[in-house]
Image (tube, grey):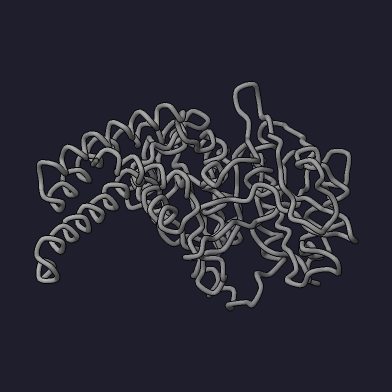
Amino acid sequence: MNVLVGVAIVLWLHLNPDSSMVKRQQDRGLDWLSRLVTNTSFAPQPSQPIFMVNVDSETYTEWGEPWLTPADKVADIIGRLLQAGPAQIVVDFDFSRRRDLQPLMEVLAPYQEDDAPETQLIFMKTQSLQLPAKSVLPAFRRSALDDLVASSARLHWAAPLFRPDRDGVIRHWQLIIGGCNQGGLQLLPSVQLLSVMLSHGVDQDLYALLAPGQEGCLSMPHFAGRVRLNADKQIELAGDELRHRIVFALPPTPEDGYLPVDWQGVSLPAVTALSARDVVAAETLATGGLLDGALVIVGASHRDSGDIHMTPVGRMPGSLVLANSITALQGLEQVQRPPLLLIVAVELLLIVVTSWLFMIMSPFAATLVSSAGIALLVVPLSLLAFSQGVWLDFALPILAVQLKSLFVEASLGYSKMREKGVRGLL
């Protein structure tokens, strides 16, 4: 009987993967696992160091706490960075609806010449809150930089959007964002997808990745294709939420420093933070030639930026969320479940063992021992599998044990009531 109850509970959990109880338990398990692997060898390993030029609180105060980050300051930072020759510069500011972009356009003018800089620049393209007529998709906002970006193969727009869950925590990315432009569907890659594609020299037609029948602005775009980066790595755009889970490798405030990355014959932290005020004030960047070929993200972390987000590993600025997403997409296969046969075999084994425990122990003791045993046995295996992009779900077996405990308690209560009446429950 105990085995049948266990099978029924596990079957119900698999048939209702979108129920709030199951999703909440899975999120707790994955969040906990994420906190364990962050900044360890189990996390995705960066293929190149990330330099972050940060408009921090000190910079923000020194600049007079401007409502918008001054375009001339950003232009000065980009100009200095271009001299160091990084592979990519991600500029994490919204430049739509602004009329002070002339200094930035002057710095970017060489991109219209034949000997344009080799550095790829990625700018953020945001969406309007107002929906166009006959559209379920918002429009992308216009910017004074649009014509300049369109004129160069090394200037790009990307979408900085993520998918916060109901509790406000960012756990998943959106790899391609759909919008509406003059009644037609417009697609933009996310920052992390575009960055990884540029790193691998992939020029992918996003519209070819759409599922059949996707056109116009009357429905949300769905994707069925994949982005092939090389012979061994591809990015699936379809699939469940698990495939689009961000594995946070970089913590928000590391006490012991970030994991080391071998770069140009030296060992560098995975992330090196540079204060924007120091970059602007310095005559030359104090990074030697280490920026050559590296990835740079220019963003803000001060409290008034409105760009501080909750993640499973803590609060972090949006630029660090982008850095985590790029690192995860570069260094790890998308998270997936193990083969169904393996899942069934493990769950049947757990059902038999927990059923035996419930026969020889009280429900409380059996629940405690079962949960502890699952944690001690499955969690280390989950860590090892997670480093390879496979998630062994230890959260669902523990939830099944908890549900079974409730069932056993209810059964015992019902038996007592039948034997002794209502007093049997008291």
Left/right of residue 58 with respect to residue 418 in the rendered view: right
Residue 288 locus on image (x, y percent): 55, 41
- The N terminus, quarter of image: top left
Horizontal side, residue 256 vs residue 86: left or right: left
Total label count? 0
Residue name at image x 84 percent, y 58 percent? 146
Looking at the image, residue 254 sits to the left or right of residue 75; the answer is: left
Q: Give the image quarter of residue 87.
A: top right
Is residue 377 or residue 192 the one in the foreground?
377
> What x and y, as percent, mark residue 282?
58, 57
Relative to the observer, which residue lies in front, 330 or 290? 330
Q: Which corner quadrant of the image does residue 220 belong to?
A: bottom right
Residue 330 in picture, x, y percent from top left: 56, 36
Q: Nearer the viewer, residue 147 or 338?
A: 338
The picture places residue 11, in percent across and down from the top left corner, at 40, 42
| Image side of residue 365 versus residue 118, left or right | left
In depth, the one of 96 and 268 nearer the eye is: 96
Asked if 175 appears above or below 202 in the picture, the reply is: below
Quadrant (top left, top right, bottom left, bottom right) of the C terminus: bottom left
* x 56%, y 66%: residue: 307
Q: Residue at x 68, y 45 (%)?
A: 83
Query: Residue shown at 56%/63% (left/top)?
Result: 300
